[in-house]
Image: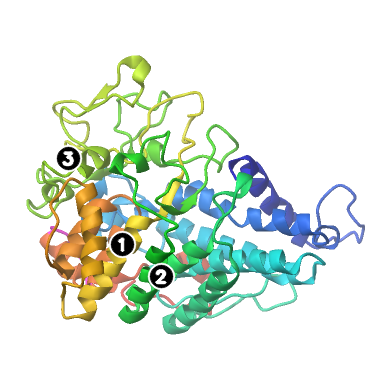
Amino acid sequence: MKNKLYLAILLPVLFLMACQKDFLERNPLDQITEDNFYNTAEDARRAILSCYAPMQAVNWYGKSWMITEIPADNSTTGGNDPDFSPIDNFTINADNVPNAEFWAEHFRLITYCNQVLTQVPDIQMDEQERNSILAEAAFLRAFSYFDLARIYGDVPIITVVPSLDIDLLVSRDPVDKVYEFLITDLERGIEFLPSAYDGLDVGRATKGAAQALLVKVFLTLERFDEAMALSREIIASGRYQLMGDFAGNWLKQTTDNNAESIFQVQYAGCGPVGTGNACQAFFAPWGQNITKNSDGWGSQIPTGPNIDNPGTTIRDVFTDDDLRQYHTIMTPGDYYPMINPSDGGYTYPAAGASRSSTSIKKYVIGGGSDVCFMTTPQNLHAIRYADVLLSLAEASCRRNGGISVTPDVLDAFNAVRERAGLEAVGSVTTEMVFEERRKEFAFENQRWFDLLRQGDVVNTMRLHGKNMQDYHKLFPIPSEELAINPNLKQNPGY
């Protein structure tokens, strides 16, 4: 799929051009339009690939940590940035730029998916392939709406392609209705998506991806029986397995579309803007020349007891025998032979290289011929198999009063622990699951959602030293959206 990324970036631009009115009433001869594009099976294939472009963009997964990690207790800002320091300090307002970008990119993906879902049904092509492409668009739309529902609550459900002929001043739909809508999309994905792809199509959404995302939806809605049943179905399929070593998910040679990957955002280094992973640019410690480019800003850093309340930080929760720490956070004196090996590797300074004296290791791979400014070729983990295993444990515990001793639940939970070098346990509690998730998925756009699901996010963040209020569970609707659409109403508190 990486070879198709340039097409995925180009097509949305062409589609936007195609949607504009031709005021001179002349048929364009040198560009793609709705009239001359959606005619063949190949057109349908190109169209669905374009739907992945917003996810690959810097303003989605390149920066989404500003929304999904910074407000939580694993992360803090590397400096005093006017864009995301207010998110960290719960002083955010509706003018916040990362928040506006998060909203815009998610609805951009929804627009592309709606274009496919509107146009592809009329193409004469193999019925099975058409159903699969439509299910793929539905999955991606559901993926976007799941984020939007958890961040903003009520959001508009849009199923048509914007045009001058329809009313664009839509209102927000109740969040319960949004969940019903996206569950229907995911059920469509489960029914029609293939179990796997091969060749250049590896990395596209599969049935397993739709199942795993639906598990996360069921957990959010506290539909625990359904979450358990679907988790067990994924496990029983035998299609996925944990990498034998946690490092396998983070080493450049083994991370992309590996055995643990259920859904990854696909990247290619040093291509056009939006085709490379920008996380290293923001995560790599400042002034260390790790990237061999003029990035590496240390914008997001791990929390530590020297700058946050001791006992509440990501540095505190890792024990020395936990093998995940080394590949998750850089601590003083850590040596990484895989980072710029031609330089003899990299040793994290004894005094640290951030104000918390730690830096993020995940997605930091160093320089290379395929690493350029704000871009690496390393895929981004959206859903890993470890998530399914811990979701089964979470659903079982929360269903059964906070504890589980069910054999297959313990097997799932202990598989994640033992891979981390920790001892197996004979029972598991809800608190243990969330602590395991905190260490397993640090800086993977999970922690804020985990805290929301755990139910005591306000108290957790106050103990962490942040002045969070109950209304901060939802983000503000961006002011520019309110300005152009008076039918949108702001969330309380903003």
Q: Position of residue 326 (x, y in %)?
A: 22, 37
Q: Position of residue 449 (x, y in %)?
A: 31, 65
* Image mark count: 3
Q: Which residue is mark 3?
A: 356
Say which mark, if any, is on residue 31: none
Q: Which residue is mark 1?
A: 389
- The mark closer to the camera, 1 or 2, is 2
Could you tell whether 453 is left or right of 143 in the image? Answer: left
Other residues around mark 2 within 10 Å, as few (<14) / some (14–19) / many (≥20): some
Is there any visible trace of residue 484 in the rendered image? no
In the image, residue 465 lies in the stretch drawn in magenta:
yes
The amino acid at mark 3 is: Ser
Q: Position of residue 116 (x, y in %)?
A: 69, 65
Residue depicted at 62% across the width and 45% down the height: 199
Please tell me which residue lies in front, 318 or 301: 318
Q: Is residue 95 above or below residue 296?
A: below
Q: Quadrant of residue 7?
A: top right
Residue depicted at 29% across the width and 42% down the height: 245
Mark 3, secondary structure of its residue: loop
Q: Quadrant of residue 248?
A: top left
* Cα separation between marks 3 and 2: 42 Å
Q: Is residue 117 above or below residue 90?
A: below
* Cα separation between marks 1 and 2: 11 Å
Please tell me which residue lies in front, 422 or 479: 422
Q: Which residue is mark 2?
A: 233
Mark 1, secondary structure of its residue: helix
The region drawn magenta spans: 464-469
Could you tell whether 481 is left or right of 401 in the image? Answer: right
The amino acid at mark 1 is: Leu
Could you tell whether 149 is left or right of 105 in the image? Answer: left
Mark 2, secondary structure of its residue: helix
